[in-house]
């Protein structure tokens, strides 16, 4: 507490002390003190941090980014449900990087789920529509889609179509090449923008190619080979996703 005066102390007593006799004497009893410490006024959280208090003009790589792993999962990584409303929840909770695991689905529609497991499947299109709706409800700084892409070229093109059609001007189409870029744009510059993070197809792949997986390597806590569905058996375990994982 800074700038504490006798008058500010009297104001605290007047606001939180329930006993009229104590108020008249300018003193605070245990009940009043408890009321004060349990109130927002007695919170150890710095009230200045209810608003953006950092310098947001540095390159994006200079910040810790609150990220969610396996965002679509309600529970464990083996048998839980996949739901689009998980994206709405984590985005409104403060996440700025969400994961989308993409696989070929029936009828030419890409799906999102945790591969080689019994987790349920949701449509990629529905995921992008949900992200579009909730990305900037509580936070205007950029959202990163971390794409783990296992789709064929045909369905990758369908994914690209959904990204451009649904996200529209929100989708940041600028590219960053490690060869010619020395500095990333800042969060301030990218306000209201959605970025896609993932590998590109090889430059020499043919236009009519049916396959062309471009997924990053499996993350450290990705399911191990002995945890996959082999001969109908499920073994091993996995952690829960969380909106508070810090990544650079």
Image (spheres, rainbow, N blue to C red):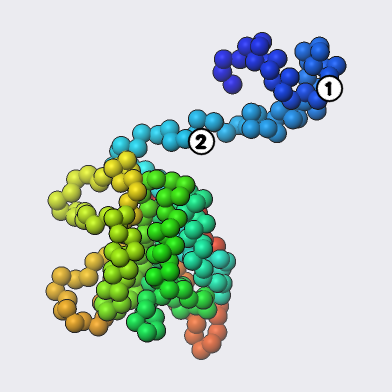
In the image, is residue 101 above or below residue 168?
Answer: below
Question: Would residue 13 appear left or right of 74 to someone viewing this image?
Answer: right
User: Which comes before the other along the chain, label 2 or label 1?
Assistant: 1
Comparing 158 with 115, the one in front is 158
Residue 83, numbered label: none
| Residue occupying the point 74% across, 25% down | 16
Pick out the residue farthest to the bottom.
231
Comparing 64 with 208, the one in front is 208
| Badge 1 element | loop
In the image, is residue 4 above or below residue 173?
Answer: above
| Rendered location of residue 65, percent (x, y) | 41, 48
Q: Residues under labels 2 and 1: Cα distance?
A: 32 Å
| Badge 2 element | helix
Which residue lies under the disc numbered 2? 50
Quarter the N terminus occupies: top right
| Rendered location of residue 162, percent (x, y) | 32, 68
Please count the marks in the image: 2
| Residue occupying the point 14% across, 51% down | 180
Question: Would residue 109 appear left or right of 17 to someone viewing this image?
Answer: left
Residue 19, numbered label: 1
| Residue occupying the point 84% across, 19% down | 20
Instruction: Judge whether residue 202 can be spotted in this image.
Output: yes
Instruction: Judge whether residue 237 can be spotted in this image.
Output: no
| Residue occupying the point 32% across, 54% down | 170
In the image, is residue 94 above or below residue 151?
Answer: above
| Rendered location of residue 78, percent (x, y) | 54, 74
């Amino acid at each position: 507490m800074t700038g504490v005066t006798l008058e500010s102390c009297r104001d605290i007593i007047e606001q939180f002390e329930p006993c009229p006799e104590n108020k008249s004497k300018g003193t605070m009893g245990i009940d009043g003190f408890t009321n004060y410490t349990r109130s927002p006024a007695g919170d150890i959280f710095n009230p200045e941090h209810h608003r953006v208090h950092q310098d947001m003009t540095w390159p994006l790589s200079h910040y810790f980014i609150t990220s969610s792993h396996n965002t679509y999962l309600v529970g464990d990584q083996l048998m839980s449900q996949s739901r689009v409303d998980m994206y709405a929840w984590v985005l409104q909770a403060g996440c700025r990087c969400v994961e989308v695991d993409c696989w070929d689905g029936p009828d030419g529609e890409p799906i999102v789920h945790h591969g080689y497991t019994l987790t349920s499947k949701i449509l990629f299109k529905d995921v992008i529509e949900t992200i579009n709706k909730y990305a900037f409800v509580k936070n205007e700084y950029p959202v990163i889609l971390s794409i783990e892409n296992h789709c064929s070229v045909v369905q990758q093109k369908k994914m690209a179509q959904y990204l451009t059609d649904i996200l529209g001007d929100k989708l940041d189409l600028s590219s960053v090449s490690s060869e010619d870029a020395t500095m990333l744009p800042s969060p301030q510059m990218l306000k209201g923008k959605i970025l896609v993070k993932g590998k590109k197809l090889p430059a020499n792949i043919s236009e009519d190619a049916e396959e062309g997986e471009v997924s990053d390597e499996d993350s450290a806590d990705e399911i191990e080979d002995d945890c996959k569905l082999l001969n109908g058996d499920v073994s091993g375990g996995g952690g829960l996703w969380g909106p508070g994982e810090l990544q650079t």
